[in-house]
Amino acid sequence: MSESERGLHKLSCRRKWLIPTILSSIVLAVLVLSGCSQGETAPVATPSVNHGILQVHFLDVGQADSALLISPGGEAILIDGGNNDDGPKVVDYLKAQGVRELSAIVATHPHEDHIGGLDSVLQSIPTKTVYMPNAASNTRTFEDFIAAVNTSGAEKIQAKSGVNLNIPDLTGVFLAPNNSGYKELNNFSAVLKVTYGKVAFLFEGDAEDISEAEMLKNGQDLKANVLKVGHHGSNSSTTSGFLKAVAPQHAIISVGADNEYGHPTPAILDRLAKAGTNVYRTDQSGTIIVTTDGESIKINKTDSIELSDIDLHGEVVTITNRSNSEVNLSGWKLVSEVGDQTYHFPSGTTVTAGGSLKVVSGENAGAGADTLVWTQSNIWNNNGDPGALYDSQGKLVSKR
Ligand SMILES: [Zn+2]
């Protein structure tokens, strides 16, 4: 991003930036939203479909937002796509999850840390529908995003309070924005509530106190089991009244380690703790995956996977899943550090909840249930050879 963009975003996050060009921006957004095309209506199956389960992945994109939903029927929805630099990483993650088409992209609002990577996604993965608020920005990032939307041929739908997101098995409804003009772009954030069975998720984007007050005033049903906390845990959001109405059991904060804004703030963490909410942070846990069958909720963080044993002589590596939900190892890799050799897990490889998986090598290596063959050659150096396991984003998960 350019220096001027960086400056704008920084100021906006501190809520001091008034948008002088809001009127022209709105005109641009109206133009942007007016040209609608029809998308395909057939459901899209993906290989990582887990029937009866809704998956919500909160991607570790540093100081930014990106969440991937995979419906019980296999339809994929992406809410935001990280910063500009995160684009390829988000695309790789989606592909590793078997996403070949997106039923919908929700671009919550025009700030770079939400729409920055979406142009890459739109250029790489066919997308049926793009939901976005009637807000615009005069940044290169926003122009790139709009150009990618237009080129993609996706149907454009204005995200605002009362608009439905139509995905089979799920109930999706936008709760905000409730107004057509705000001084702060963050308050244009498309706030989406997704319900599957008895379990509801609320994705706030960067909605701030003004938008939260409007949602409360509207008398909308804000109650949700899982809250994607507004504005990365800034003091601008998660007002007491709003938090009381949502009453989440779990809160996800998408935030970068040691970010310059001080997100999440001690005040917000304290407020969430006093409300009895479990807090999960992408800066501490990496990508966070929440799954639900519509009744119960399971939350797994990539740090629940461990390289539990390396038998150098027997050429057997054991990987254990200590979480209570299945973990998909598509796109993951295992590295023998001394030999400098890498094993790529085949797409669709999973480790069951509490289960383990073996990766074997050497002349006697044979495949079996929960056993994958790396190669018939010897990999591990018997004099000592650390192994390392990396997730689909190249992040070190476990080392032994
Ligand atoms: Zn943001």
Image (cartoon, helix red, strand yellow):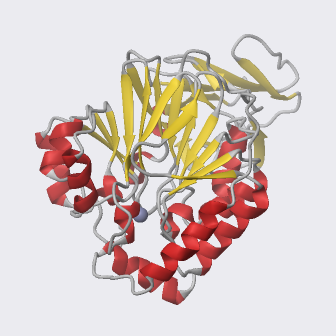
Relative vertical location of residue 148 with respect to residue 131 in this rendering, above or below: below
Image location (x, y in percent) of residue 10: 38, 79
Can you say which quadrant of the picture contains the N terminus? bottom right
Relative vertical location of residue 200 with respect to residue 180 in this rendering, above or below: above
Indicate left or right for 108 with 279 as reference.
Answer: right
Indicate left or right for 30 with 42 as reference.
Answer: left
Residue 22 lies in quadrant: bottom left
Q: Residue furthest top?
A: 369
At a point 54% along the width and 81% down the height, the residue shown is 138
Relative vertical location of residue 204 with respect to residue 368 in this rendering, above or below: below
Image location (x, y in percent) of residue 385: 66, 43
As rendered, which of 373 and 14 lies closer to the eye? Answer: 14
Q: Is residue 387 visible?
A: no
Quadrant of the image where one finds ligand 1: bottom left
Image location (x, y in percent) of residue 287: 49, 44
At a point 15% along the width and 40% down the height, the residue shown is 244
